[in-house]
Amino acid sequence: MGEMMVDYIVSNTDGGANLRDAPDSGAIKRNLPFGTALTSIPGSTGKWKSVETANGEKGYVSDKNLKVPASDAIVRLIQSAAHYWEAFAFGRGKEDTSPYYDLVVEIWKELGQGMPPFKRDEKGKVLKDKNGNDVYNTSHPDWPWSAAGMSAFIRRAKGYKNFQFSRLHATYIHNSVVARKAKDPDAPFWGYQLNEQAVRVGDLVCQWRGTQQDYKSAGQSAGFTSHTDVICDIKSGYLYAIGANVESDTVGRKKYTINSTGHLTGPSGGSFKSDNTVFMLMRNMVA
């Protein structure tokens, strides 16, 4: 980020935002990809924001494609999610094919909490790749990499010094509830019930998997099966969040319903399959 003052981030995951040389019908100078950080400069008019990029390009961007981030740490987390989404070909790259397999292996190694078992043939012999290296079974059902992936998102973002990296989402979901109850000012996330906080970019959506969970149970245990995605793009009536090991084993984008006040509806008012197991929000507290 350097010394750049960040006032906006391009939050539109459907094509980024066009940088124009003038408001309204001005010529398009270039497209700014999702995750681009921008500084506000004099000249904004109506919905058109006068902005400058990190490399000094100036122009106008429609505010419908922008969000005002609460902190630089949130900007970095959105950019980290954008990095991994692009690295996995925007949801098309699968965990067990090259080069995405190598990314999953790297995610596990960075986490440092064990590795998936090796792949074996019908005789039990460990399979090798073309370079003679043992091949990990990145699709093993006992080794889902979604929490390791979210840990990688947050590690790359930097500044989340008290985040407990884990192969279980429940670790940091539980920690967020405990931190909120203790009013811990140094905690990276505070946990909230769905009706308590409107969503912001950089927050995490929490889903239960297997056994149904709620806010109370999340505060009592860190041993349940669950999932989190980072909120990146907030629209009218819904949002997009990016997570790991989703959409057939990739880094992908999911849609969640929000109501007129900007709160996640969960299963009670959801329009999408992903809403059915939403039970909590983790508010990003990093300044």
Image (spheres, helix red, strand yellow):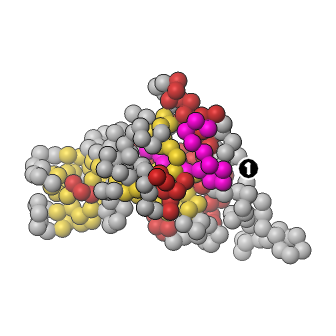
The residue that appears at 50% across and 29% down in the rendered structure is 180
- Image side of residue 159 versus residue 47, left or right: right
Query: Mark 1 — residue?
Result: 114
- The amino acid type found where label 1 is placed reads Gly
Instruction: Mark yes or no: residue 54 visible.
Output: no
Residue 238: image x %, image y %? 37, 57
Q: Viewer-proximal residue, 174 or 245?
A: 174
- The residue shown at (46%, 62%) is 272
Where residue 39 sits in the image (x, y, percent)?
Answer: 24, 46
Give SS at disc 1: loop
Q: Give the side of residue 167 with respect to residue 133, left or right.
A: left
Q: Which residues are magenta?
A: 203-217
Give the image location of residue 231, x and y in percent: 42, 51
Q: Is residue 187 visible?
A: yes
Does residue 253 belong to the magenta stretch? no
> Residue 250 versus residue 55: which sits nearer the camera?
250
- Left or right of 164 in this view: 275: left
Q: Residue at x 34, y 65 (%)?
A: 14
Q: In which quadrant is the C terminus drawn?
A: top left
- The verdict on residue 215 being magenta is yes
